Image (spheres, rainbow, N blue to C red):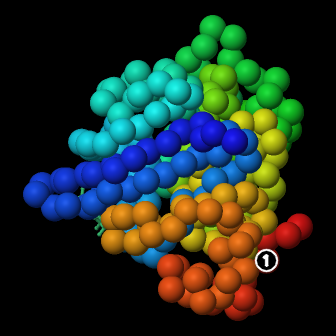
Amino acid sequence: MSALLSARDLRVVIDGLHILHGVDLDVAPSGVTALLGRNGAGKTTTVKALLGLVPRTGAVAFDGAEIGALPTHLIVRRGIGYAPEDRGIFAGLTVAENLRLAERDATPAYDLVHELFPELKQRAGQLAGSLSGGQQQMVAIGRTLLNGNRLIVADEPTKGLAPKIVAEVADVLARVAETVPVLLVEQNLALVRRVAGTCAVLADGRTAHQGDAAELLADEDAARRLLGVGSHRPAPEVTP
Ligand SMILES: Nc1ncnc2c1ncn2[C@@H]1O[C@H](COP(=O)(O)OP(=O)(O)OP(=O)(O)O)[C@@H](O)[C@H]1O
């Protein structure tokens, strides 16, 4: 199965600091590919480099076309949707207004968004700032689905959320990945175990491992070495 997106030797230098030293990454054409690594390993920078949000060198192929040197607006136009770490939603606008602001296509895919997240339809008039963390993630991810994107990039969608809400977001991601492939930056290994098929692990700005997510997480020594945790310790619940 050839990758939907593959990055080779991705490097990022910011203000003279070498942040990525050669990241290789393959995103599977279906399901969830998890991007893992300890704090500061370079996950968010990798995602930003893929989207052209930071100066970078290296090759990035998306659906067979080279996008490694393109500016961000041309990359997103090729069909990559981004849900950033801070969600980037407008707290003072309603759910419907947040979605409307993200419209790019002449015929935005509201059917898909409302089918996946009926709650966003029910809460169309509610201020986004008064939604739960999980519901806010639905808005952030829903926005990326409006425009016929072929890859969704979600950066730590569960960060700072209570376990019950993490379970909600896990459901959201699992549902989305049935329709559109997802590149997921995530620290919650229980969630990764539940939703991800493949994974890449970064360490110190480089790719330290790529492969099957379940296999890695089943290997306690490898998980401890690469991620700094025993993958079998009691984890926050993510199953409903
Ligand atoms: N604009 C910047 N200027 C200086 N250093 C930066 C910049 N952006 C990132 N870094 C540094 O690069 C390293 C990688 O950061 P990055 O945010 O990509 O890591 P991460 O794996 O996403 O971490 P976390 O899991 O903690 O969010 C960190 O040491 C960070 O401090």
Q: Nearer the viewer, residue 133 or 141?
A: 141
Horizontal side of 223 relative to 10 (left or right) equals right
Q: Position of residue 58 (x, y in %)?
A: 31, 42
| Residue occupying the point 71% across, 72% down | 215
> 10 Å neighbourhood of mark 1: few (<14), some, or many (≥20)?
some
Q: Quadrant of residue 158?
A: bottom right
User: Quadrant of the image for the N terminus?
Assistant: top right
Vertical order, 157 against 192 (above or below): above
Vertical order, 125 against 171 (above or below): above
Q: Nearer the viewer, residue 9 or 181?
A: 9
Circle 1 sits in a helix, a strand or a loop, which is it?
loop
Horizontal side of 66 relative to 26 (left or right) equals left
Q: Position of residue 238 (x, y in %)?
A: 79, 71
Please name the residue that numbered disc 1 is placed on.
237
The amino acid on which the numbered mark 1 sits, given as a three-letter code, is Glu
Q: Position of residue 182 (x, y in %)?
A: 65, 45
- Can you name the residue that lies furthest to the front here? 1
Q: Is residue 27 visible?
A: yes
Horizontal side of 118 relative to 12 (left or right) equals right
Q: Report the number of discs.
A: 1
